[in-house]
Amino acid sequence: MLFSVITTNLFALYAFTYAPKHHQNHPLLQTQKNMSLISEHLALILREIDSSQRKLAKIEKEILGYDSIDVSRPNMASELKLFLQHHQLPLGKDSKTGITEMVASVGHSCEKSADLLSQYMTYKISGPCPDDWSLGQKLILRGCEPLPRRRCLGKTVPKVGLSPFPISLWKPVSEKVATWSGLGCKNFNCVNSKKSSRECAACFDLVNGSETQRFLKPRSKNDFVIDDVLSLGGGGIRIGFDIGGGSGTFAARMAERNVTVITNTLNVDAPISEFVAARGLFPLYLSLDHRFPFYDNIFDLVHAGSGLDVGEKPEKMEFLMFDIDRVLRAGGLFWLDNFYCANDDKKRALTVLIERFGYKKLKWVVGEKLEVNGSGKSEVYLSAVLQKPVRV
C-alpha cells in the first residue's frame, strides 16, 4: 500500500518537471507533450488510488470478518433474499429520523455462515417452521445475531401441568413442557447427571439438589447470602439482570423478595429457556456477544458468575464489562458470584479491569473450592459485591 502511494507521487513529480533538451526550441509542441504526459500520469494516479482503496477495503473486511451478504449466490433461499431487501418508506424521507428506507437487521457475521443461514430460511410460507432451533442457536453462537425473522408458524409444545406463581418457583418441571430435539438428553434426570458447568451442577433438581439451599446457606466463604447482599443496596434493589443464570434459581430467590430479575439463557445441553419460563421467570435468549437490549442505567443489580468468562482475548471481556456498566445504574450493585480464575493472570486481569470503573468494593473474597468434576483438586474463585459510582 505504501509503495503504491510513493510510486504514484514520483510519477506525478516526473510528469510536471521533466522536459527533454532537444525540444527546448519548440515551446508549443513541448507544452502539448507535457499536457499529454500529465493526462496519462493523472489517469495512472487515479487508477492507483482506486486500486489502493479496494485493497484497503478488502483488508478491513478480512480484519473485521465483515461483508455484506451476497444474495446473488446460488442456492440462496428466496425468503432470505426478500427479508434482506431494502424497503422504501411509502411517504419518502422521514422528517424525524432522516431515513428513507427500512433495512433488515441481521448480524454481520451471518456472511460467514451464509449456507447455514440459507438453510434456516428455507421453509414453507405460512406453514409449520422446521424443528431447527438448534440450527438457529448454532448460527447465534457463530455471531449471526440477531437472526432474520421468518414467515412460518413455530412449533407449539403443550404446556401441561404448569403451576401458578409463586408455587411454580420450586415445583418440579415436567419434561413434557420442553423441546428435547437436538439434545443428547431427553429428560431432566439425564441433564442433572451431566454436571456440565460450574453454574449448573444438578441445577434442574428443585427438590433434592443443592439449588434448594443456594443463596440461602453458604457452602464456602465465596458464597454470599442473598439477604446480606440486598441489605448493601439500602432497600433500593427492585429490578436486576442475571448473566448466565443457569436454571433461574437466582431470579427465583429474588422473586421471593419482590425483585424482578431477567435471566440471560442459551439452551446449551438442556432446554434452559423453557425450564426458566416454566418456573414463572423471564428468560432472555441471548448470547454474550450481543449488546444487551436495554437502555442505559436501568438495573439496580447485575449478577454474574463464571459465565462472564467469554474467551482468551482481554478485549472481549472489556467490551462485555463496559456493557454491564452501561445498563447498571449509579449506586447499583454488581455481584460477581464465584468467578473461576483459571490462573493468576486471569484473576489479575479481571481485578485490573474492575478497578478501571472505580467501583466501591463492598465485598471481595478470593477462595478455593474443590473441582466440580470430583477430581479432588482445588480451584480458585473470586466473589465480590461492587457498587457503581456516580460519574459527572
Image (cartoon, grey):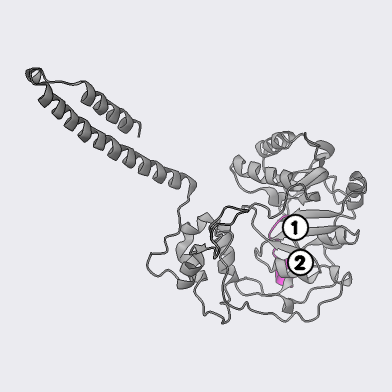
Residue 230 to residue 358: above or below: below
Secondary structure mostly seen in the magenta stretch: loop
Confirm or deny contact between disc 2 and disc 1 (CB under 8 A): yes
Q: Position of residue 288 (x, y in %)?
A: 65, 53
The residue at the point 74 percent across, 34 percent down is 355
Residue 110 in the image, given as x and y percentages of width and height? 50, 59
Q: CA distance from mark 2 to mark 1?
A: 9 Å
Q: Which residue is mark 2?
A: 276
Tell me if residue 77 comes above or below residue 110 in the rendering. below
| Image coordinates for residue 173, horizontal then vertical, percent | 79, 73
Could you tell me the amino acid type at mark 1? Gly
Q: Is residue 378 visible?
A: no
What is the magenta range?
189-200
Q: Position of residue 147 (x, y in %)?
A: 57, 63
Neighbor class of circle 1 (other Cα within 10 Å; few <14, some 14-19, many 20+) is many
| Location of the C terminus (image quadrant) | top right
Left or right for 207, reference 175: right
Instruction: Name which residue lies at 68% across and 55% down.
Output: 293
Residue 107 vertical position relative to residue 134 in the rendered view, above or below: above
Q: Which residue is mark 1?
A: 245
* Left or right, residue 71 beside residue 319: left
Q: Is residue 245 visible?
A: yes
Image quarter in which the N terminus is found: top left
Please report the residue visible at 72 percent of the width from the left and 36 percent of the height from the top. 351
Is residue 148 within the magenta segment?
no
Residue at x 12%, y 24% (from the top left corner) = 28
Up/down of 293 relative to 378, above or below: below
Element at label 1: loop
Give, as a three-letter code, the residue at label 2: Val
